[in-house]
Image (spheres, grey):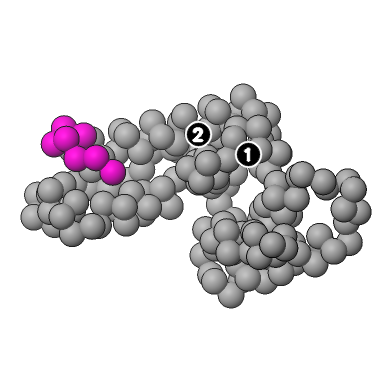
Amino acid sequence: MSTLDQHESELVRYAQRFVGDLHAARDVVQHAFLRLCDQDPKELRGREAAWLYRVCRNRALDWLRQSGRLQSFDESDELQLTGEQSSSPESDPAVLAERGELSDVLRSLVDRLPLLYREPLQLWSQGWSYREIAEVVERTEGNVRVLVHRAVKALREHPQVSSWQAAGVRG
């Protein structure tokens, strides 16, 4: 299986989370694979995935800067999620779980996290190690652990998630 076959679909999803547009995400991934062609295979041996993710990340950030849509990447960004809890049946955790919307709501909450926290959390949830994530996002492994922890904590403290936990709903 080629590197393209192995990683293309995951990279497109990863890039789309950054740029919010499928066509732009495909362009970002195409850029990464073109850059891969210029690399010495001996230098990347065993690190192709992390290298591709880092190139995709950097290209996506460039795209966001150029389009004026880059949100602050600073840790001082507010990590609280906004969302009012309504008393309608639509916000009842049992109804959400029965309708299979629980994962959609959680995905929406993750999308509201600042990029600084969202990116490591998404890679971590895909099974990446802290070391691998650190290589992609160009931070220390310890910092990645802190960012993932803060992201999970922010999700747990969201009023809607808190109500699910109180009601015993599992995601």
Q: Position of residue 157 (x, y in %)?
A: 30, 33
CA distance for labels 2 and 1: 10 Å
Comparing labels 2 and 1, the label whose residue is closer to the camera? 1
Three-letter residue code for mark 2: Val
Magenta region: which residues?
Answer: 164-171
Three-letter residue code for mark 1: Ile
Q: Are marks 2 and 1 in contact (CB under 8 Å)?
A: yes
At 37% from the left and 52% from the top, the residue drawn is: 107
The answer to whether 41 appears left or right of 33 in the picture is right
Q: Position of residue 19 (x, y in %)?
A: 56, 63
The answer to which of 57 and 101 lies nearer the viewer is 101
Q: Identify the residue under disc 1.
A: 133
At 59% from the left and 44% from the top, the residue drawn is: 73
Which quadrant of the structure image shows residue 169? top left
The answer to which of 40 and 57 lies nearer the viewer is 40
Say few, some or many: other residues with alpha carbon within 10 Å of mark 1 (under 14 / 14 to 19 / 20 or more): many
Q: Identify the residue under disc 2.
A: 148
Which quadrant of the structure image shows residue 28? bottom right
- Quarter that holds the N terminus: bottom right
Question: Is 167 covered by the magenta stretch?
Answer: yes
- Quarter that holds the C terminus: top left
Q: Secondary structure at mark 2?
A: helix
Q: Position of residue 130 (x, y in %)?
A: 60, 32
At 8% from the left and 55% from the top, the residue drawn is: 89
Q: Secondary structure at mark 1?
A: helix
